[in-house]
Image (cartoon, rainbow, N blue to C red):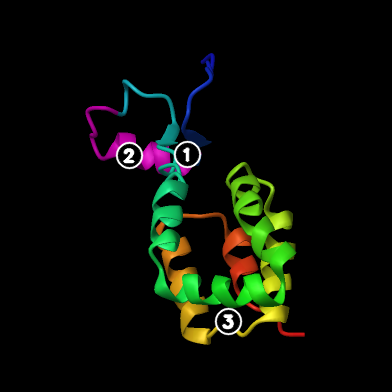
Amino acid sequence: MAAYRSVVTAEIREIPAELYAAWQAAGNPKASAWEPWEVTPPPPPPPSPDWAQFKATALGSASLNSVMADAYQAAPVAAGALAAALLRAEQGEHQDFATTWAAIGQAVTVPPEAVAGFVGVAQACNLPADFVAALQPSAE
């Protein structure tokens, strides 16, 4: 019996011969119509990151505005660079954001409840894990 394979977006595994034989013996009407292959649909793709929602939430965040007001006094270069770093993060370049946010965190106190809120919003918006990790202070 010739086996044909084509490019599909599913996982295809050969069913063990004894399982296929049992399936045929049980009188399954589809047994003669199908090759001994099991087709499993692929998992759904992960949800797309919603950067627009994250940025809109950040702009309206009283805690972020408070942190940034302090940051503009203590670390004006880092504070001024945050918006550009966020745009680069949206394009997949998370290191600039991580470095800028860490500099702000070293210059001013970012309340733990504010960090938890930023992390929660980032996770709800399906942002990349390395970006979410950059929001949290390092354990150094």
> What is the distance, in whole Å, between disc 1 and disc 3 at their CAs?
56 Å
| Residue 114: x %, y % from top left | 48, 79
Q: Nearer the viewer, residue 78 or 55?
A: 78
Q: Nearer the viewer, mark 1 or mark 3?
A: 3
Q: In this view, does 3 lie above or below 135?
A: above
Q: Give the range drawn in magenta.
A: 17-30
Per the image, the residue denoted by label 2 is: 23
| Residue 29: x %, y % from top left | 22, 28
> Which image quadrant is residue 30 in?
top left
Q: Which of 19 and 68 is in front in this view?
A: 68
Per the image, the residue denoted by label 3 is: 110
Residue 96: numbered disc:
none
For the C terminus, the image quarter is bottom right
CB atoms of marks 1 and 2 within 8 Å: yes
Which residue does the image show at 42% across and 65% down from the upper left?
Answer: 121
> What is the distance, in whole Å, between disc 1 and disc 2 at their CAs?
10 Å
Badge 3: how crowded within 10 Å, few (<14), some, or many (20+)? many
Badge 1: how crowded within 10 Å, few (<14), some, or many (20+)? some
